[in-house]
Image: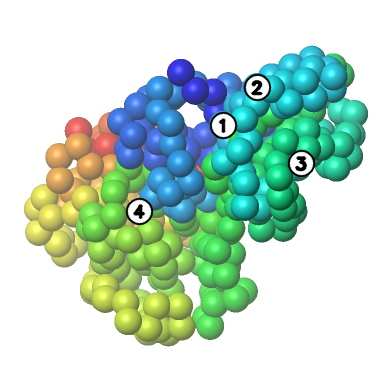
C-alpha cells in the first residue's frame, strides 16, 4: 500500500475532496477515503503507484499538490539519518528541489539543510527550486516535531485561471468562474470524449471548461445574444473548437432520448418569478432525465434561495450535495444527481 498526501484548496475543501476521489475512482477503479492530517493537508492509502504522467491529474482544479510518502519521523536527526540511508542515485544528472511546509506553526528548517543529505550522496547535484525535475515536500506538523517527507507527483499549474470571467473577451455578471465550472464538470464522473450538455449555457463559462477537459460539448440557451458571446469566448481560447449549439427554451424537449452522457449547468433563477422558475424546472427535469443515458449524472449549481432540490429528487437520485458559503445571504449548492 502507498500513502499519498494532498494539499487541497482551503476555500473549497469538500468540493476538492469529491473532485479528487471521483477522478481517482474513475481512472484507477479504486474507491479512496481521504483523511485530514492538518488544515488543508489530507492523506489516503492506495494500492496504485502513480506517476506524474497520469492523465487525470491535469483535470484537477481544487488540488494544489499530490505527493507520495517516502517516510515519516519525529525529529530532524531522524530525518537526516533516514535520508542518508535512501538511494537517490536516480537524481544523478537531473535537477531536484525540496520545499518545507509548516502550516504556520512548525519549526522552519532551511531548505539547504533539508537538501544536504541528498546533495552529499550525489556526484553532480543540481538544485532547481523553481522548476525541478524531481521535487520533494517536507511537511512539518505543528505542535510536534513530526514530519512527513513526500516526493511530488503533481503540482497544479492552474491554467484554468486564464479563463476566469475578467480575462475572457466577454463576461456577464451571471457567468460562472472557471474553477467552479471545471470542478463541477469533473463531478460528472466521465472520461474524455463523452457528450456533455449545458442546457442553460449562457456565454459558456461551463462549456469552455468542459471542452478543455476533452468532452464533446453541446450548449443550449434561450438567448441568441448569449450564444453569440459564447462563440466569441470559444474563438479566443479554442479557435478550432467544434461544438454544437441550439437556441431553444429548455422547458421543451430538444434532444433525443438516451443521447447525452452528462448534463452540467447553473440554472437560471429570479427571486421575483418563483412560479415561472418552478414550471421551467419541472419541465426541464423531465426532459433532462429523458436525454441522459441510464446511470448518467447531472450536476446542477444553484443558490440557497432557489427551490430546486425537492423537485429534482422527484426525477433523479441524489449522489451528493456540496455547500459553498459565498456570503451572509448566499450559499451555493452543487447538487450531483443520477438518472434513476
Ligand atoms: C445562470 S445563467 C448561466 C450562465 C452560464 N453558466 C455562463 O457561464 O455564462 C442562466 C442562463 O439560462 C438562460 N435561460 C433562461 N431561461 C431559459 C430557458 N427557458 N431555456 C433556456 N435557457 C434559458 C439565460 O439566458 C442564461 O444565459
Q: Is residue 259 visible?
A: yes
Look at the image and tell me in which quarter the C terminus lies: top left
The structure residue drawn at horizontal position 74% and vertical position 17%, both measured from the top left corner, is: 73
Q: Are marks 3 and 2 in contact (CB under 8 Å)?
A: no
Check disc 1: other Cα within 10 Å, few if <14, some if 14-19, many if 20+. many
The mark closer to the camera, 3 or 4, is 3
What is the CA distance from the residue labelled 3 to the residue labelled 4?
49 Å
Q: Which residue is mark 2?
A: 71
In the visual, does 321 lie left or right of 193? Answer: right
Label 2 vs 4, first from the N-terminus: 2
Q: Position of residue 20 (x, y in %)?
A: 47, 38
The mark closer to the camera, 3 or 2, is 3
Q: Which residue is mark 1?
A: 68
Q: Residue furthest left?
A: 257
Check disc 4: other Cα within 10 Å, few if <14, some if 14-19, many if 20+. many
Q: Is residue 29 above or below residue 1?
A: below
The structure residue drawn at horizontal position 61% and vertical position 44%, both measured from the top left corner, is: 91
Q: Is the CB of the residue bearing disc 1 within 8 angstroms of ligand 1? A: no
Callout 4: helix, strand or loop? strand
What is the CA distance from the residue labelled 2 to the residue labelled 1?
9 Å
Amino acid at each position: 500500500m502507498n500513502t499519498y498526501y494532498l494539499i487541497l484548496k482551503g476555500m473549497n475543501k469538500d468540493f476538492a475532496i469529491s473532485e479528487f476521489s471521483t477522478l481517482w475512482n474513475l481512472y484507477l477503479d479504486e474507491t479512496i477515503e481521504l483523511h485530514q492530517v492538518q488544515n488543508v493537508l489530507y492523506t489516503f492509502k492506495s494500492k496504485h503507484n502513480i506517476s506524474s504522467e497520469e492523465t487525470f491529474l491535469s483535470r484537477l482544479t481544487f488540488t494544489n499538490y499530490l505527493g507520495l510518502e517516502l517516510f515519516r519521523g519525529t525529529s530532524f536527526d531522524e530525518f537526516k539519518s533516514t535520508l542518508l540511508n535512501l538511494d537517490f542515485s536516480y537524481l544523478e544528472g537531473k535537477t531536484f528541489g525540496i520545499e518545507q511546509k509548516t502550516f504556520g506553526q512548525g519549526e522552519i528548517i532551511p531548505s539547504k539543510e533539508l537538501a544536504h543529505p541528498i546533495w552529499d550522496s550525489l556526484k553532480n547535484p543540481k538544485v532547481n527550486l523553481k522548476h525541478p525535475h524531481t521535487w520533494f515536500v517536507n511537511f512539518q506538523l505543528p505542535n510536534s516535531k513530526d514530519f512527513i517527507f513526500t516526493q511530488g507527483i503533481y503540482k497544479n499549474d492552474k491554467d484554468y485561471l486564464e479563463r476566469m470571467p475578467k480575462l475572457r473577451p466577454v463576461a456577464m455578471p451571471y457567468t460562472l468562474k472557471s474553477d467552479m465550472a471545471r470542478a463541477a464538470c469533473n463531478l460528472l464522473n466521465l472520461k474524455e470524449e463523452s457528450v456533455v450538455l449545458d442546457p442553460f449555457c449562457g456565454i459558456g463559462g461551463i462549456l469552455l471548461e468542459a471542452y478543455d477537459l476533452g468532452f464533446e460539448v453541446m450548449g443550449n440557451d434561450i438567448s441568441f445574444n448569449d450564444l453569440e458571446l459564447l462563440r466569441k469566448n470559444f474563438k479566443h481560447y479554442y479557435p478550432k473548437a467544434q461544438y454544437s449549439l441550439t437556441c431553444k427554451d429548455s422547458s421543451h424537449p430538444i434532444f433525443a432520448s438516451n443521447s447525452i452522457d452528462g448534463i452540467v449547468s447553473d440554472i437560471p433563477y429570479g427571486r421575483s418569478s418563483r412560479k415561472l422558475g418552478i414550471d421551467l424546472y419541472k419541465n426541464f427535469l423531465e426532459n433532462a432525465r429523458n436525454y441522459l443515458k441510464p446511470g448518467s449524472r447531472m450536476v446542477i449549481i444553484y443558490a440557497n434561495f432557489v427551490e430546486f432540490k425537492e423537485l429534482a429528487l422527484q426525477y433523479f437520485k441524489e449522489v451528493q450535495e456540496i455547500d459553498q458559503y459565498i456570503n451572509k445571504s448566499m450559499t451555493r449548492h452543487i447538487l450531483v444527481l443520477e438518472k434513476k
